[in-house]
Image: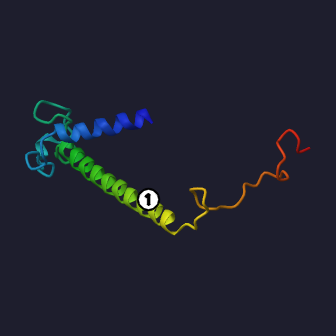
Amino acid sequence: MAASAAIATEAALAVLAVPPPARLDGQAVDASTKLRPPSRERLSGTGDVGRAVLPRCVHGLRISLLVGLVAALAATVAGAAFAAAAVAFAPPTGRGRAAGPAPVTGMTPGATPLTSR
C-alpha cells in the first residue's frame, strides 16, 4: 500500500514539475537527432524518428492520471449511492441494522465451538 502511494505521488509530482505539453513538442521530428542519448536539450533522449521521449511520456502520464481520477471519482459516487440506497430501503429491525441471514456455522443455536461436538 505504501509503495503504491509512493508511486502515485511520484507520478503526480512528475506531471506537475514538467512544463505543459504546449511548451514541449513531442511530435516535432528531427531526423538528425535520431536515437540520441539524454542531453540538456532532450532530458530523456530521442526515439527512432528523432522525437523527444520526455514530452510523450508526460503526455501519456497526464492522460493516465486523468482517467484514473475520473474512475476513482465515479466509483466513489456509485458506492455512496448504493450504500445510501441500501440504508434507505432496508427493512427496519429495531436493532439499528438490516436483518440478514444467520451465519452458517454448522452448530446448533446456543452452542459454542467447544460444546458443539
| Image-based side of 117 in relation to 41, left or right | right
For image coordinates 51% across by 69% down, the residue present is: 89
Relative height, residue 17 to residue 90 (above, below) = above
Q: Quadrant of residue 78?
A: bottom left
Q: Could you classify mark 1 by the number of other residues whose Cα lies within 10 Å: few (under 14), some (14-19), or many (20 or more)?
A: few
Of 87 and 46, which appears nearest the observer?
A: 87
Q: Which residue is mark 1?
A: 79
* Display coloring: rainbow
Relative height, residue 14 to residue 104 (above, below) = above
User: Of all residues shown, which one is farthest toward the front?
Assistant: 94
Where the C terminus falls, by quadrant? Answer: top right
* Spot occupied by residue 61 in the image (x, y as percentages of width and height): 27, 47
| Image-based side of 37 in relation to 102, left or right | left
* Spot occupied by residue 116 in the image (x, y as percentages of width and height): 88, 45
- Residue type of the residue flagged with mark 1: Gly
| Image-based side of 25 in relation to 95, left or right | left
For image coordinates 51% across by 64% down, the residue present is: 86
Q: Quadrant of residue 76?
A: bottom left
Q: SS at mark 1? A: helix
Q: In the rendered image, is residue 74 in sight?
A: yes
User: Of all residues shown, which one is farthest toward the right?
Assistant: 117
For image coordinates 46% across by 63% down, the residue present is: 82
Of 33 and 59, which appears nearest the observer?
A: 59
